[in-house]
Amino acid sequence: MTPRETPETTRPLAGLRILSLESFGAGPYGTMLLADLGAEVIKIENPATGGDASRGVGPHFLGESDSLYAQSFNMNKRSMALDLSRPEDHDDFLALVATADAVVNNLRGDLPKKLGIDYASLSKVNPAIVCLHISAYGRDNSRTAWPGYDFLAQAEAGLMSMTGEPDGPPTRIGLSMIDYMTGTTGVVGLLSCLMRARITGKGCDVDTNLFDVATHQHAYSATWFLNTGTMPQRLPRGAHGSMAPVQSVKTKDGWIYVMCMKEKFWQVLCERIGRRDLLTDVRFATQLARRDHRAALTTELDASMQARTTQEWLSVLTGAIPAAPIFDVAEAFSNPFMAETAMVTSVHHPHAETLRVLACPLKIDGARPAKAACSSLGADNERLLTPLHRREEARHEA
């Protein structure tokens, strides 16, 4: 099922046209969510540089100008090959802007103004255009011209200092979560400004950046530090800073993560693992006491829960307390519940008859929007530009 065959109820952004000058993660992740929801997202790619740099990220390629990496961030998108340094291509871009609702980029902070893709430049063509700028550090400070990436934001914003075991080095989050969160944050801002532009007829610039979003992820830990000086600490077993036991626990054949975020879950855990004696142990009598005696509590839980396998404990705990097995990636994708959720789907690709991809994490009226592979570099030039050229010819003839 192609996006155009998807039931309209799953395409709430149908009719929205978004031009995107994007590469790698943050921008493409955000615009992919919009494309999944029915927006026409057109990647403007420079053929002189091979287009979006992600097309060349290995080790798994799909033909000469595509890769599994690139498809992961660009499903349901169109591609136009335009070199904005060429006057004729720049004219075609402006003609597209006149038909678009938004222009998105995740370039270095100083480039949008230089390239003329900010609101001040594009509003001359389309006063209602909304321009989303996703950069490493923002467009209005001393780092405007600095390049930057997800892992650097994790490092400098303090997130790596909070990740990993206490006796290990600072560790980045396993995935590029700041890219993904920045892309998501950006499109929330974009959609909000589009709503206003629909009412007022006036667009705007909307900005977000990796550093700001990484800082924002501190949430309550920042509030604690800013008001009390409390420093977040790396805790053993990936434990929660305030609640206990909220951590990984050893089983006979692996690990399980338990989350006793409420007192009732602690009581149920003790009952289900056959350790009611822990309920009367003064060291574990309250949430505060359990936090202060976390090491002793971990020893007690390990001793009891290593008597059975992870699956055996899940059969005892599932549905009674929040608990989950700690899987590797292969185990995660072979999990029967993964199949039940339908979070993996398949699409056609010219270089892979069946390409297995992740489904959209949103459902509209109970259905996930359909997926389709991103177009190859420049594949949509003729289809998208021909109507614009004909319109321009007709205008001149008139």
Image (cartoon, rainbow, N blue to C red):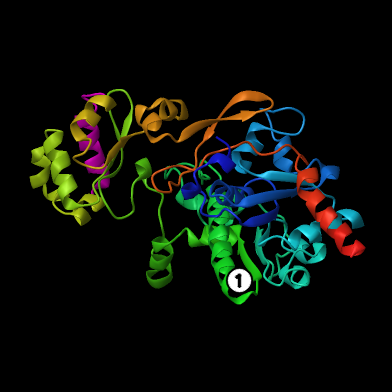
- The picture places residue 242, in percent across and down from the top left corner, at 30, 55
Does 314 sit above or below residue 234?
A: above
Image location of residue 79, percent across then percent down: 73, 44
Residue 383 occupies which quadrant of the picture?
top right
Q: Is residue 99 positioned above or below 354 on the image?
A: below
View extreme (front): residue: 398
Q: Is there any visible trace of residue 86 in the rendered image?
A: no
Residue stretch rendered in magenta on the structure? 293-309
Most extreme residue toward the bottom is: 200
| Residue type highlighted by circle 1 | Ala
Quadrant hosting residue 182: bottom right
Q: Is residue 141 visible?
A: yes
Q: Depth check: 88 or 59 in front? A: 88
In the rendered structure, does residue 140 fall within the stretch colored magenta?
no
Q: Is 130 placed above or below 380 here?
A: below
Image coordinates of residue 72 in percent, x first then y, are 60, 38
Q: In which quadrant will I find the C terminus?
A: bottom right
Per the picture, the main secondary structure of the magenta-coloured stretch is: helix
For image coordinates 26% across by 46% down, the residue present is 294
Disc 1 element: helix
Residue with the mark numbered 1: 197
Would you say residue 296 sits in the magenta stretch? yes
Q: Residue at x 43, y 46 (%)?
A: 363
- Could you tell me how many numbered marks the image carries? 1
User: Which corner quadrant of the image does residue 116 belong to?
Assistant: bottom right
Is residue 283 shown left or right of residue 185?
left
Image height of 82 relative to 95, above or below: above
